[in-house]
Image (spheres, rainbow, N blue to C red):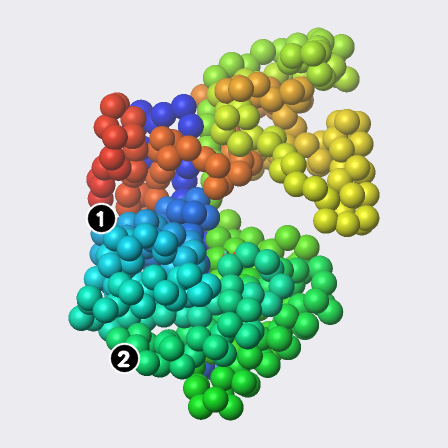
């Protein structure tokens, strides 16, 4: 298909993003607006290309974490609304954000003061969303602060309070806490209305909330995970048709037959139980293969699950270790993954060859931007981004228009 492929590359299937968008839309109540969250390079799928596809399919509102991410979208020609979640704390960036019509989050009195100062010398309308902290402990005004701030914001005629939002901490795991957060948020909205202020975009739902509490959609939902083809951690919804657009691929670079009892990898970390073909793939932990997230378990049950998983992994139960796919069949990665290599055990009778394509499970958001991305749309390659060959910026070979 594409000549001279590098050692490893990522295929991103934009049709899958389109399908996930339709699935998300089917979950929305009449009148709910969709804010497509494409932070962290659209969860590793490529922010600009993903935004273009979503826009061409009717998405009018985007969100990212940082000012810089928003500016990259503007540079890529995305003229739609872009909400920036993280407070913008530099005056220069605030001015740029206003100039480029970004939607600014006000999450503290500090944020408000800075914007108020900057606004005195700008001529444009400034769109803001207020962020309220109801229990995540990250960004957000306290309820009292919101009410105190309103008269000040209203005095500033350049500022348009378009939206107000909060973010849920544990929608997948703690119903009582989630309902409590929702109640706090509704109470603030109620108080604002009593004070005569009706804000048109009220939102609190991420992917997990949309799935578990559809009644919490309010005016808009902020969705990232579902668009990227995954159900949120801790939520099983087999009825949902989601498709992963992202496939990290490589090729077999060595293939040898080894005897039963042979040791594999550093520390003799695996011993073949039968004779096998052992394939080497040029993918290692630097690519995010077999990397475990070292977060503190969130509770008793989580701790127990983590321990059981480690024990099954130790027992080499294939399903609990990384598996790669060759011609549609899964094979286990054996032994400790190397920095840039890994070993795959394949039964002796399987027809595989050096050069065969291998699909590898990696952490999408950790994949180096140096690795070539191949974008597919309607089954055709529409764009290749590569830094290979000493080029330091993505090269657009084909446009995304079909
Ligand atoms: C990342 C993020 C979202 C999207 O959450 P998903 O669970 O990925 O849908 C929504 N809101 C905020 C504030 C976020 O940071």
Q: Is residue 343 left or right of residue 72?
A: right
* Circle 2 crowding by C-alpha within 10 Å: few under 14, some 14–19, many from 20: few
Which is nearer the N-term, disc 1 or disc 2?
Answer: 2
* Residue 399: numbered disc: 1
What x and y, as percent, mark residue 23? 50, 65
Which image quadrant: the N terminus? top left
Residue 196 in the image: above or below residue 372: below
Task: Name the residue located 41 percent from the left edge and 57 percent from the top edge.
Answer: 87
User: Does residue 394 lie above or below 349 as drawn?
Assistant: below
The answer to whether residue 310 is left or right of residue 358 is right
- The residue that label 2 is drawn on is 157
On the question of residue 194 being in view, the answer is yes
Q: Which mark is residue 282?
A: none
Residue occupying the point 42% across, 61% down? 110
Mark 1 vs mark 2: in front? 2
Q: Position of residue 320 (x, y in %)?
A: 71, 35
- Whether residue 33 is visible here, answered yes or no, is no
Q: CA distance from mark 1 to mark 2?
A: 42 Å
Residue 160: x and y in percent read: 32, 76
Residue 226 falls left or right of residue 393: right
């Amino acid at each position: 298909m594409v000549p001279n492929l590098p050692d490893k590359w990522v295929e991103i299937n934009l049709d899958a993003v389109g399908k996930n968008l339709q699935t998300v839309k089917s979950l929305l109540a009449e009148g709910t607006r969709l804010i497509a969250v494409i932070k962290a390079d659209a969860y590793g799928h490529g922010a600009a290309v993903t935004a273009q596809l979503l826009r061409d399919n009717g998405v009018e509102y985007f969100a990212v974490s940082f000012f810089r991410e928003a500016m990259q979208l503007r540079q890529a020609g995305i003229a739609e609304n872009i909400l920036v979640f993280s407070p913008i704390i530099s005056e220069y960036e605030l001015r740029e954000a206003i100039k480029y019509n970004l939607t600014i989050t006000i999450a503290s009195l500090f944020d408000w003061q800075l914007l108020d100062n900057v606004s005195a010398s700008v001529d444009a309308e400034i769109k803001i969303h207020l962020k309220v902290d109801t229990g995540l402990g990250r960004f957000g005004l306290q309820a009292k602060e919101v009410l105190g701030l309103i008269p000040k914001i209203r005095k500033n005629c350049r500022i348009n309070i378009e939206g107000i939002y909060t973010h849920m901490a544990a929608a997948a795991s703690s119903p009582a806490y989630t309902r409590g957060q929702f109640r706090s948020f509704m109470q603030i909205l109620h108080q604002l209305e009593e004070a005569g202020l009706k804000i048109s975009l009220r939102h609190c739902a991420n992917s997990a909330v949309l799935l578990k509490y559809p009644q919490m959609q309010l005016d808009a939902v902020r969705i990232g995970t579902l668009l990227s083809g995954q159900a949120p951690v801790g939520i099983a919804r087999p009825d949902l048709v989601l498709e992963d657009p992202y496939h990290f691929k490589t090729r077999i670079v060595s293939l040898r037959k080894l005897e039963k009892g042979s040791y594999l990898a550093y520390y003799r970390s695996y011993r073949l139980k039968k004779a096998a073909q052992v394939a080497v793939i040029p993918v290692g932990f630097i690519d995010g293969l077999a990397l475990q997230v070292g977060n503190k378990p969130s509770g008793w049950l989580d701790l127990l699950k983590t321990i059981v998983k480690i024990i099954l992994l130790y027992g080499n139960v294939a399903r609990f270790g990384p598996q790669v796919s060759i011609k549609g069949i899964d094979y286990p990665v054996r032994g400790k993954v190397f920095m840039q290599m890994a070993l795959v055990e394949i039964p002796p009778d399987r027809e595989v060859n050096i050069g065969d394509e291998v699909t590898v499970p990696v952490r999408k958001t950790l994949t180096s931007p140096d690795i070539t991305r191949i974008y597919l749309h309607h089954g055709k390659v529409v764009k290749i981004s590569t830094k290979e060959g000493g080029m330091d910026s993505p090269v657009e070979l084909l446009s995304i228009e079909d």
